[in-house]
Image (cartoon, rainbow, N blue to C red):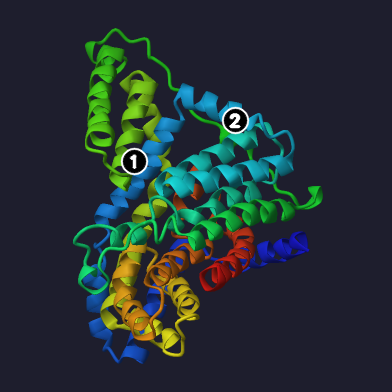
Amino acid sequence: MFKALSRTSVKLVERYLPDPYIFVVLLTLLAGIAAVSMEHKTPMEVVTMWGDGFWGLLSFTMQMVLVLVAGYMMASTPVIKRVLSTLALVAKTPGAAIILVTVVALIANWINWGFGLVVSALFAKELARTVRVDYRLLVASAYSGFIVWHGGLAGSIPLTIATEAHFQQDKIGLISTSDTIFSSFNLLIVLAIFIAVPLVNRLMMPDEKDSVYVDRSVLEENKASIVADDRPAARLENSMVLSMLIGVAGLAYLFNYYVVRNGGLNLNVINFTFLFLAIILHGNARRLLDSLNEAIKGTSGIVIQFPFYAGIMAIIMHSGLAASLSDWLTSFATATSLPFWTFLSAGIVNVFVPSGGGQWAVQSPVVIASAQALGADMPRVAMAVAWGDAWTNLLQPFWALPVLAIAGLKAKDIMGYCLIQLFITGAIIAIGLTWF
């Protein structure tokens, strides 16, 4: 059944899903039209919101570029390549490769989503070198692990509401991660997804005649080497001493951050860790920069599309669209059903506002008021927003861009498989939020 469904879904998506750039342009127009027709904003007001917010994600855009670049540079070091190659040898069959990459992706994304996106994509490429398996499904399986990120250790909403002086503290106080990330209902949802997602990915594996195998050129990498050059500048580029000196300084900072200051994971420290491990493990600047030149080729989609999403977020947030949608969906809820309707509304909002922190800023006033009026469980309602934000990433190609850049594929190649997982995981999360 899953094989037939996935075949139909893949064909449908390949035919009708445009390039992610076209997708974000269409979303921009749709958000603008909705703001004019539903929130009674003038076209110029909408254009002003869009233009004012267009550069609102510049810092985040650079962070995402570094997630891809620093992660790629670290993973292309000889040591990490050997680790990934050794782990890939565990998979002896195509089915085992699909299950293995999914489990690794789920674990990595539950720990930290930036780490998970890069590692799962690179591991998929390594598996493709050792096992003959449908490459589209392999990469889709790697990306499908992203579904658990907001229920994991780096979930932005549960971490925000557990942090002193968060912007809604006067209304809900501090909510411990023991009531959100480590609550029984959330852990049961995570466990169910850890079982279902690898199984469904395996069941979707196409027959030999329908499989698409990777072009070996996609897997080829430029071999960094020390250039035989007696120039003083070349000797500096190939110097191990310089790399070790700056690398040790970076490790000293990380030791202070993690051990002495007991700092937590965030995107900046993940990028810092990737970068300085890459500096040390490459051994010299020349090999590091050769790796950088390869990595930077895949960042074009991020650079051009993220400003458009920032503009969409500005329209959705400042026009009142997100609040109206959330208010409508929660208006007929009960204390028991509010988490379900909140989850559904968050999934819809996420298509236009693919940012966990941004989505909480947009939806929290509505969902907090609704939860308090109905006497609903506040931690569960907050996690409903978190899971809704994570859920429709299986439909929205925004977060797939780093994975696609590393894998050398396009969104239409993997989103057909992700669409099946959208329905499976949606049912699991909805049941978990309502009855677990």
Amino acid found under the numbered disc labelled 2? Leu
Give the mark nearer the N terminus: 1 vs 2.
2
Amino acid found under the numbered disc labelled 1? Ile
- The residue located at (27%, 13%) in the rendering is 241
Residue 190 image position (x, y, % from top left) = 54, 56
Please give left or right for residue 262 compared with residue 64 in the image. left
Please give left or right for residue 117 compared with residue 2 in the image. left
Q: Quadrant of the C terminus?
A: bottom right
Up-down relation of residue 433 to residue 182 (above or below): below
Instruction: Examine the image and state in which quarter residue 189 appears.
Output: bottom right
Please give left or right for residue 305 compared with residue 413 in the image. left
- The residue located at (72%, 66%) in the rendering is 8
Please give left or right for residue 202 compared with residue 43 in the image. right
Up-down relation of residue 21 to residue 67 (above or below): below
- The residue located at (44%, 62%) in the rendering is 21
Instruction: Examine the image and state in which quarter residue 318 appears.
Output: bottom left
Residue 230 image position (x, y, % from top left) = 29, 7
Q: Which residue is mark 2?
A: 87
The answer to whether residue 216 of the structure is visible from this angle is no
Up-down relation of residue 115 to residue 247 (above or below): below
Up-down relation of residue 152 to residue 67 (above or below): below
Residue 270, numbered label: 1
Residue 360 image position (x, y, % from top left) = 33, 68
